[in-house]
């Protein structure tokens, strides 16, 4: 059920779970994408005359109040982006929340304090969920990026109140369905990032579902080393050689092509502007490390992107945060964006650093969908159930 099913809601108290877990430096929100994404749902409910009560977590405070994890720090940014007054209550349950809600007029927006200031939240505790539910008539979940957590505000509430997917949750699920649910083939996946160890389940699941799996970033070194190639001082999890081989065997069995770099950009130090050279992947100097995939590899990856009808992307191809080791990520992102714009490709990117990589490449608005989810995007790509989504699907 979506907001389309919510018509007569003037004066109703709608508890909206949003993800305001945004990066903050020196008191300033450094990436407001998650806030921007929840604006459509808040505005729509407010315009329909609902009393919009926002529930969210911020950081990992372990069940008790922590001053620098207070959502009062995020409220001004929400207010700015929403361009509407956002009231704040210093607790997510109890008297403070009830008093603030009692003072709301139709269309008002209220942000409740970090739900994780109570131990019950992460335990999905029945009493805590009940205390949250006491403040609402309807529950809307617009936090896909927290949907891998079975917490009171992400899962429990949907059992107690009539529950609906918000606009961002809806868009996210539709995009993901296009990406891996019932995708147009060929499907190509690009998986990058530093470590294989955090993405074993992901790789194992993808090789069964996609036609080609491009492996880049630091994790490619583990695969290259597993076949006996010297990777010099490159980031490499040598102890995962057997796992890497197993993934390659699974891929071969499933008919999925594994695409590894054939050349790399190497440097002697990990810093912006470090002296660097392009070498064949079989000729990495013993004292150097690979920080990006090389031009021949970029051409190969782009060929795969050209053949693909669907692309799912998680993780950068190189150390994109330090120039000039961002070249491969930027080149492939631009190519994917151009094909998407021409209507030839459905492209879905997400997880961890991927949003910043796509922003850095300037293509975040040109792909079919860029998910702001980290863990939730990965778990979805791993084929795992997401409690916050499953409970919404169970609503009649
Ligand atoms: C995230 O930042 O990925 C979500 O907000 C979930 O946060 P968590 O990993 O602390 O549950």
Image: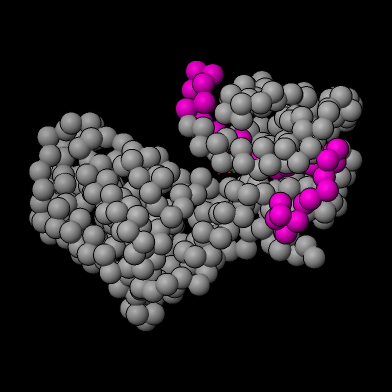
Residue at image point 32% right, 68% down: 308
Q: Quadrant of ligand 1?
A: top right
Residue at image point 22% right, 31% down: 272
In which quarter of the view is residue 325 placed?
Answer: top left
Q: How is the image coloured?
A: one colour
Q: Is residue 26 magenta?
A: yes
Question: Residue 76, percent across and down?
Answer: 62, 21
Residue at image point 77% right, 33% down: 107
Question: Residue 261, percent across and down?
Answer: 21, 59
Residue 209 relative to residue 147: left or right? left
Question: Residue 47, percent across and down?
Answer: 72, 37
**Visible in this render: residue 357?**
no
**Visible in this render: residue 334?**
yes
Pick the residue in front: 5 or 100: 5
Residue at image point 79% right, 50% down: 7
In which quarter of the view is residue 319 placed?
Answer: top left
Q: Is residue 312 magenta?
A: no
Residue 71 relative to residue 204: left or right? right
Magenta stretch?
Answer: 1-30
Residue 378 relative to residue 278: left or right? right
Q: How many marks?
A: 0
Q: Quadrant of the C terminus?
A: bottom right
**147 w.r.t. 242: above or below:** above
Question: Residue 326, percent across and down?
Answer: 25, 42
Q: Quadrant of the N terminus?
A: bottom right
Pick the residue in front: 53 or 323: 53
Pick the residue in front: 313 or 199: 313
* Dominant secondary structure (helix, strand or loop) of the stretch shown in magenta: loop
């Amino acid at each position: 059920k979506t907001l389309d099913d919510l018509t007569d809601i003037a004066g109703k108290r709608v508890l909206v779970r949003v993800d305001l877990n945004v990066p903050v430096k020196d008191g300033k929100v450094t990436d407001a994408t998650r806030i921007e994404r929840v604006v459509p749902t808040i505005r729509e409910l407010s315009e329909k005359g609902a009393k919009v009560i926002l529930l969210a977590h911020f950081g990992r405070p372990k069940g008790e109040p922590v001053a620098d994890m207070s959502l009062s720090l995020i409220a001004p940014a929400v207010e700015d982006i929403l361009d509407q007054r956002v009231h704040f209550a210093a607790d997510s349950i109890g008297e403070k929340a009830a008093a603030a809600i009692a003072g709301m007029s139709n269309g008002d927006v209220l942000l409740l304090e970090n739900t994780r200031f109570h131990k019950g939240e992460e335990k999905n505790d029945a009493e805590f969920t009940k205390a949250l539910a006491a403040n609402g008539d309807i529950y809307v979940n617009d936090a896909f990026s927290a949907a891998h957590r079975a917490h009171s505000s992400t899962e429990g509430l949907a059992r107690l109140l009539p529950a609906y997917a918000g606009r961002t949750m809806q868009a996210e699920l539709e995009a993901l369905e296009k990406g891996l649910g019932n995708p147009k083939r060929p499907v190509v996946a690009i998986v990058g990032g530093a470590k294989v160890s955090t993405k074993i389940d992901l790789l194992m699941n993808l090789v069964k579902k996609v036609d080609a799996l491009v492996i880049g970033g630091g994790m490619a070194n583990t695969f290259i080393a597993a076949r006996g190639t010297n990777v010099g001082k490159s980031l490499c999890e040598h102890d995962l050689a057997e796992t890497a081989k197993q993934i390659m065997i699974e891929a071969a069995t499933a008919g999925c092509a594994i695409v590894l770099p054939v050349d790399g950009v190497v440097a002697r130090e990990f810093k912006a502007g470090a002296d660097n050279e392009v070498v064949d992947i079989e000729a990495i100097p013993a004292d150097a490390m690979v920080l990006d995939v090389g031009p021949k590899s970029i051409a190969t990856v782009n060929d795969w992107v050209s053949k693909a009808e669907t692309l799912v992307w998680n993780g950068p191809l190189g150390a994109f945060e330090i120039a000039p080791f961002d070249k491969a990520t930027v080149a492939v992102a631009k190519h994917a964006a151009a094909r998407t714009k021409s209507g030839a490709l459905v492209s879905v990117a997400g997880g961890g650093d991927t949003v910043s990589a796509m922003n850095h490449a300037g293509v975040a608005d040109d792909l079919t969908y860029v998910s702001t989810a980290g863990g939730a995007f990965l778990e979805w790509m791993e084929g795992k159930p997401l409690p916050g989504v499953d409970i919404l699907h169970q609503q009649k």
